């Protein structure tokens, strides 16, 4: 049986001089606390602090990086317990795990392989390389560890060095898990909600009208009127802020932000509730509401995260069978400069407004996002996200944006994950890569090493804390 070997200098540049500098910089930041300002872990796992059930539902089922690649190699999602949190009753966790391990070869060269190996070794102390032959042995070792107190969610939170973890939450969520954590004297961590209103801003969605009605029930506002709908959204933002929220999260098809006249917004809203609005009208309303979200952000101070440019549910049959967020979302070309101009004309220099721009279209980092952040005080460059949070893409990102905005208009790393145990290894990857990039600047005599060390700490800790207002 082959073992997994994690080289201490992994991801550092190969040039011996640069590598030695990178190692010194990394040693300064490796142990810093983790700020996780954008993620999708269910807060109930920490509120309940129950042992994780089994390895498959911890490491495979909730990670659509893993399940989508297995699907690409012919494994049906129904063989993998998808959707997350609701595994099919006729698929045993051990069988899911065997399927995953027997396809280990499919992950060669991927960031998922890197993360999973680091999780097995650094989190669980398991060095066996996954394969059809080792699947049961690894499953049994993981199951044994998960049954111990050291591997319960709160114990791992402390071991991971997490200082702040943000979740992603529906505007109508009562935030009960967050409340339970806040009221638990034994809990010393910090988990904050993030307001994710997409489904309430897009009248083209089949469930939009029912969600708007639910918004009215939760708030007591009359959401049969546009004014009541806006007031309800404002009320829920305030509720999230009262429960520790510092940010909102928006992931529409594009970054359009053209505002409507009040009468036109009223008209389209009323038509949409009746199912009578055209696609052009619903798109115009959604873009109008993005600027409304910016207006609210300038008033309440919640940081606005925007990550457009993904065609959701690309395969209709998969969506109908398994629902959303199961891995069949595909990036598209995205434009920011013209699309965001209406919003930034109004709020781009507002002292209380802050926007973090993410993309999965790498071309726009240097062409649009960095230049926008290089002028507007409110705009920050978000880290490579989703399809491009990979070692090579992170290196390209630093090269693309640093010339224009330096380091301190970037927002720090975000893990963007549902896979709880991958959080520390994803952040460690980013720290190694940033130290490698900074080491090259030092070796080329473009930056003194003491400033590089200070910048490494900023990127790892201080920038995400300050940018997302969790400090």
Image (spheres, rainbow, N blue to C red):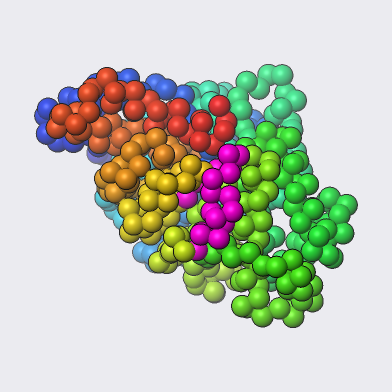
Q: Give the camera-side residue of 149 and 83.
A: 83
Can see residue 5?
no
Name the image quarter holding residue 298: top right
Q: Give the camera-side residue of 453 and 152.
A: 453
Quadrant containing the C terminus in the rendered view: top right
The answer to whether residue 287 is left or right of residue 143 is right
Is 350 rendered above or below residue 439? below
The answer to whether residue 212 is left or right of residue 449 is right
Q: Residue at x 61, y 71 (%)?
A: 283
Q: Give the camera-side residue of 364 and 65.
A: 364
Can see residue 390?
yes
Count of marks overlaid on the render: 0
Q: Residue at x 42, y 51 (%)?
A: 372
x and y, in percent, of residue 201 in the image: 67, 61
Q: Residue at x 54, y 74 (%)?
A: 316
Q: Is residue 340 magenta?
A: yes
Quadrant containing the N terminus in the rendered view: top left
x and y, in percent, of residue 101 in the image: 37, 49
Q: Residue at x 68, y 19 (%)?
A: 186
Is 448 rendered above or below residue 177? above
Q: Give the camera-side residue of 406 and 49.
A: 406
Q: Is residue 283 magenta?
A: no
x and y, in percent, of residue 220 in the image: 88, 52
What range is drawn magenta here? Answer: 339-357
x and y, in percent, of residue 468 in the image: 54, 36
């Amino acid at each position: 049986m082959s073992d997994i070997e994690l080289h201490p200098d992994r991801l550092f540049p190969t040039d011996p001089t640069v590598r030695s500098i990178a190692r010194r910089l990394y040693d300064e930041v490796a142990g810093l606390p983790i700020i996780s300002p954008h993620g999708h872990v269910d807060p109930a796992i920490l509120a309940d602090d129950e042992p994780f059930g089994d390895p498959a539902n911890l490491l495979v089922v909730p990670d659509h990086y893993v399940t989508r690649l297995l699907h690409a190699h012919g494994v049906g999602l129904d063989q993998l317990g998808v959707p997350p949190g609701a595994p099919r009753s006729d698929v045993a966790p051990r069988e899911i795990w065997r399927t995953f391990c027997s396809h280990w070869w499919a992950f060669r060269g991927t960031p998922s392989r890197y993360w999973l190996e680091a999780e097995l070794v650094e989190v669980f102390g398991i060095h066996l390389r996954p394969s059809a032959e080792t699947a049961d042995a690894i499953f049994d070792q993981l199951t044994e560890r998960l049954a111990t107190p050291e591997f319960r969610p709160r114990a791992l939170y402390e071991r991971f060095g997490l200082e702040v973890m943000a979740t992603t939450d529906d505007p109508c969520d009562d935030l009960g898990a967050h409340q339970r954590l806040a009221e638990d004297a034994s809990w010393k961590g910090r988990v904050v909600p993030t307001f994710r209103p997409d489904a309430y801003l897009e009248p083209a969605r089949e469930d939009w009208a029912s969600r708007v009605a639910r918004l009215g029930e939760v708030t007591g506002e009359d959401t049969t009127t546009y004014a009541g709908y806006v007031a309800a959204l404002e009320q829920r933002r305030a509720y999230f802020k009262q429960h520790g929220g510092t940010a909102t999260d928006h992931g529409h098809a594009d970054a359009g932000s053209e505002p409507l006249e009040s009468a036109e917004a009223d008209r389209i809203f009323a038509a949409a509730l009746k199912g009578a609005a055209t696609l052009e009208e619903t798109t115009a309303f959604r873009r109008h509401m993005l600027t409304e979200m910016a207006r609210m952000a300038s008033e309440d101070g919640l940081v606005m995260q925007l990550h457009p440019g993904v065609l959701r549910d690309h395969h209709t049959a998969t969506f109908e069978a398994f629902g959303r967020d199961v891995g069949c979302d595909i990036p598209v070309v995205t434009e920011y400069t013209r699309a965001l101009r209406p919003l930034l004309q109004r709020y781009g220099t507002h002292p209380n407004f802050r926007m973090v721009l993410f993309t999965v279209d790498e071309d726009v980092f240097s062409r649009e996002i960095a230049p926008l952040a290089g002028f507007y005080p409110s705009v920050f460059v978000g880290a490579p996200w989703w399809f491009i949070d990979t070692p090579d893409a992170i290196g390209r990102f630093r090269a693309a944006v640093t010339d224009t905005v330096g380091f301190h208009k970037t927002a720090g790393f975000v893990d963007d994950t549902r896979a709880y145990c991958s959080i520390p290894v994803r952040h460690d990857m980013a720290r190694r890569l940033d130290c490698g990039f900074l080491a090259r600047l030092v070796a080329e005599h473009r930056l003194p090493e003491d400033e590089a060390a200070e910048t490494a700490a900023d990127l790892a800790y201080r920038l995400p804390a300050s940018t997302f207002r969790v400090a």
